[in-house]
Image (tube, grey):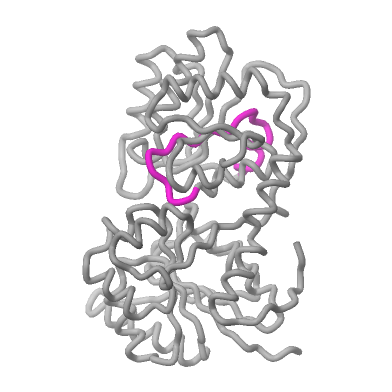
Amino acid sequence: MEKITMKILNVFYSFKQGGVERLGIAIANQLANYRDVESDVCIISKEYSEELLSEFLKTVKVFKLESKRKLRKLQYVRQLIRIIKENEIDVVHVHQGNLMPFFLLIKTACPEVTFYFTVHDTYIFSSDLNEMDRKIANLICKRIIAISDGVVKDIRSCGVKKEKVKRIYNGINFDKFKMVERKDRKEPFKIINVARFYPQKKGQDVLIKATAILKERGYRIKTIFAGDEPQGVNGEMNRMKELAKAIGVLDNVVFLGNIQDVNKELEQADIFCIPSNYEGFGISAVEAMATGLPCVASNIAGLNEVVDDSRVGKLFEVGNEIDLANKLEEVITHIDQYNSSVISSYARKRFSIQNMCEILLEVYGKRENETRTTD
């Protein structure tokens, strides 16, 4: 048995359905494929999905912190310190920046451990974190990871030095997605959006309005929304249903909520649309591309780094339903020019979880290793 030379602990506050959580599973499982790497995960709060946790490989240890009401934060600190020391953790990778004072205590108690912090969205560093969080992150983290150039720009705008920030694109496990050759398409054209249902960020209202425009132009369209409202957001789906009804497309729009088999919906769709107002990266677009779907996305930082080639899709002016309708119409009109195999191969070359973890290990200071499984 090969000697373990690096022990990595990815730490999340909560672990429910979402892009960061799906990415966390992919990273932890891929790192566990290295013969000399131990890959573990820690969930701080009780807000987690057992179903999601079951997707980790058996070789990935999942630590769930527990506490009573009194002195809850202190109990969390003590437990995490104990986990780090007992398991001889080398690297702690943080995924929530607003817990930086908490991690400062951990770093103080475990000075030999190297900390990293991934910023998972645009404006998190500059707006969501307060000045103290930013200073602590800069102090205790060897590197701050940005998921796109747009996020790099946001972090750098707060005075973080260039050499402190490393851009690493998110990756997915392409083996979990089936590339589908879409031939003999039949109307209605199916446009799918997979995202948390939060129009202020994800722009579902813009897609509903674009659906109405396409319907007026004589196209038979079925627009499908997969994803539920995030925690703390209520009434947005009902509000969008009212919008669809008011502009005459309620029969053209399907609200699925959270579903287990997203891949099946992607495989049966014709176009993927991600009309976000802001987005750190756009991993759902990569997942759609893995199945061979052409993508129509907002021309914003993050997304325009994913959909950056005319062979894989088109970009539209953010928030502009007319331009979105025009771009969707262009794709529909020339749908046979989009080759599913080309789209999937293009995404795999740039956004595989294998490539992502290789870069992560380089950043951690680990030499390249052979893995148990290959791409």
Q: How many marks?
A: 0
Q: Is residue 256 left or right of residue 133?
A: right
- The residue located at (55%, 76%) in the rendering is 40
Answer with the quarter of the image where residue 351 lies. Answer: bottom right
Asked if residue 8 lies left or right of residue 3, the reply is: left
Q: Is residue 189 left or right of residue 115?
A: right
Residue 28 in percent (x, y) is at: 58, 69
| Residue at image coords 46%, 79% | 92
Q: Residue at x 55, y 57 (%)?
A: 170
Residue positioned 55% across, 23% down in the render: 328
Residue 186 lies, with reference to residue 161, above or below; the image says: above
The image shows residue 76 at horizontal and vertical percentages of 34, 79
Q: Name the one closer to the observer, 8 or 316.
A: 316
Query: In the image, is residue 341 part of the stretch drawn in magenta?
Result: no
Q: Name the one closer to the observer, 124 or 73.
A: 124
- Please provide percent x and percent y for residue 309: 61, 39
Q: Which residue is situated farthest in the front direction here?
A: 162
Range covered by the magenta-colored residues? 261-281
Q: Relative to 140, is 130 above or below?
A: above
Give the side of residue 369 with respect to residue 163, left or right.
right
Identify which residue, 314 or 225, lies in the foreground: 314
Q: Quadrant of the C terminus?
A: bottom right
Please check the rendered image and state whether residue 278 is part of the magenta-colored stretch, yes or no: yes
Q: Quadrant of the N terminus?
A: bottom right
Q: Position of residue 103 (x, y in %)?
A: 34, 78
